Image (cartoon, grey):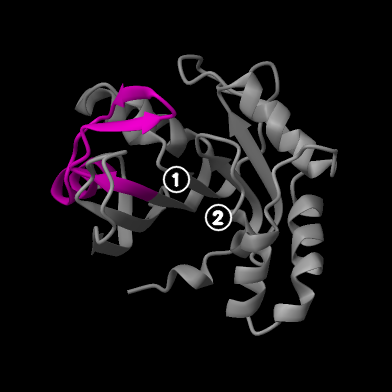
Amino acid sequence: MKNARHIKGNVLIDLSPGSYVHHLYSACEFFQHIIVLKVSDRCILELKRWLDSRTGAFDWEHAAKLHAEIEGNSDQFQDKEGKVRSAIPHVLKCDFEKENMADPIVLPPADCIISVWLLEATCKDQDDYIRYLRKFSGLLKPGGHIMLIGALDMSYYTVGKDKFHAFTYDEDFARKALVGEGFVIDNCKVKKRTAVSDLTDYKAMIFIAAHKEKLI
């Protein structure tokens, strides 16, 4: 089984909701360029505010410190923030319903795609999940990798006072969907939920690393 830490290359495409960047602090050690795609104009605005170190930007210093401590360089967290910023050349608007999600910009073939908590938030059903995986696959080089982080058996999540429907799926479906779209699963881990909260009802978190089969 391959170790996900060995996934590296030139271009990483991040397809995740919100304007958070904590999952990219490790990624910048393995990829030279990180292209961030967002559906929401507000998310793009917030992320660009952080990238430009503008007044009022959300402070991700705690995430930088955590990653620096994990890597044994706790006193170099500011260097870590700078490295993430310099690795992100573009934050682009995307539309999953378009053939070219980043139209009119043509994206370079990616070595890897990472998607965190996106599919359960945007998909209505299994067909949507599979359709989005197919679109993700189209952004990858042959042999390219995909990393998915998601919430299993979740039916809703809340943001502020608003409650939103979530697509409910389990580990077996996620595995079969990836294989059905031509991916080979290299690693799959499931961690049961331990936190208690009524903000969402997910049962476990799933991490899947897979690669796209090369054409012979």
- Circle 2 sits on which residue? 23
Residue nearest the viewer, comparing 136 with 168: 168
Q: What is the CA distance from the residue labelled 2 to the residue labelled 1?
A: 8 Å
Foreground residue among 141 and 208? 208
Q: Which residue is mark 1?
A: 116
* Residue 21 coordinates in the image, percent (x, y): 62, 49
Residue stretch in magenta: 149-178
Q: Residue furthest bottom?
A: 72
* Mark 1 residue type: Val
Indicate the position of residue 7 as horizontal and vertical percent values: 52, 65
Disc 2 + disc 1, Cβ < 8 Å: yes
Q: Sequence order check: which comes first, mark 2 or mark 1?
A: 2
Please tell me whether mark 1 sits on a helix, a strand or a loop: strand
Query: In the visual, does 44 lie left or right of 125?
Result: right
x, y percent for residue 120:
32, 34
Asked if residue 158 can be seen in this view, the reply is yes
- Relative to residue 125, is residue 41 drawn left or right? right
Q: Residue at x 28, y 64 (%)?
A: 189
Quadrant location of residue 14? top right
